[in-house]
Image (cartoon, rainbow, N blue to C red):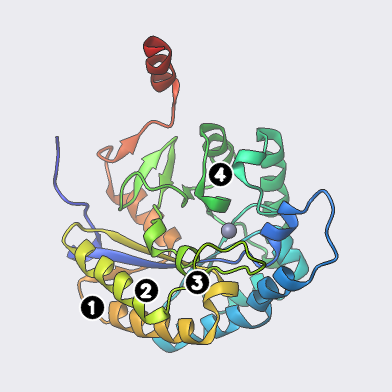
Amino acid sequence: MDRRPYLWPDGRRSAACFSVDVDAEAPYLWANRAGLPPHLGQLEQRRFGPREGIWRILDMLDRVGVKGSFYVPSVVAELHPELLPALCDRGHEIGLHGHLHELVSETPDDRFRAALDRSLAVFHAQTGTVPTGFRSPAWEMTPAMLAALKERGLRYDSSLMGYDHPYQIGGLVEVPVQWQIDDAIYFKFQGGGADRWPPEPARAVEASWRDEFQAGRAYGQLFMLTVHPWISGRAQRVAMLERLLTEIAGQDDVWFATAGQIADWHLSAHDGRFCVAADLDPLIAAVEAGA
Ligand code: ZN
């Protein structure tokens, strides 16, 4: 087995990407698609994202000199039509994230394809361009979803964790995520008695994320940080992100890039070494043989 580390451009040791899932009110609308209740609490908390959080994050990124990858459900683009053009104007990558933030476990293939076509049309109408990447709501995928992305000419997905550097699955580049460097698991707090623990202080999470970044350098890891503006646009979290990103962007042996740039690098530089099948048939056969 070939255990050489993943190769990054210009001899860099590892890579970092700042990704932003611009969920806003979309997951709430999906969860309540059978009928919206007359409640404002969660909606207002989520709408802090497009009103305030994302602009604070964009100003912070300007100060740090980092370009991010922003995944936007197309219903959020329709409700806040200033978002996609502003992201493009400020030099960031925009990518697809469903229409109503459709959860994969609740979405048949034909509805997924319809949402994909609708979001491509919204992005094109608002920006004159179409994205090359997709990130799945809640980071679930199916072989049929990968095939639908490929049919529409998308180059990469960013929803899976099969390596901690880019690889290929189902004919697409996978620019992998990591739950432990996602803000939602530490900071999301919805109120109403549903939460199981209080939000972590930003400084505790900062220490954990710094440790992950530092430890991952030895493995040539892609440090794929993921935040949500309605969660991480709050004051102490923006300040924490600024400290962490300033430190990472100051390292000479780390390539800070957008997910699209990382997917293009993988396509241009890699043979078939990190290429896996999305086909589940061998596992289905193994389950049946053991039953
Ligand atoms: Zn999301």
Q: Is residue 72 left or right of residue 63?
A: right
Q: Which residue is mark 2?
A: 205
Q: Which residue is mark 1?
A: 251
Answer with the quarter of the image where residue 112 lies. Answer: top right
Q: Is residue 207 left or right of residue 236?
A: left
Q: Which secondary structure, mark 3?
A: loop
Q: Nearer the viewer, residue 189 or 24?
A: 189
The amino acid type found where label 3 is placed reads Pro
Disc with the residue nearer the chain's start (1 vs 3): 3
Disc with the residue nearer the chain's start (4 vs 1): 4
Answer with the quarter of the image where residue 24 lies. Answer: bottom right
Q: What is the spatial separation of the Cα atoms under label 3 and label 4, in whole angstroms?
A: 42 Å
Q: What is the spatial separation of the Cα atoms under label 1 and label 2, in whole angstroms?
A: 20 Å
Q: What is the spatial separation of the Cα atoms under label 1 and label 3, in whole angstroms?
A: 33 Å
Nearest to the eye among marks 4 and 2: give it: 2
Q: Residue at x 50, y 50 (%)?
A: 139
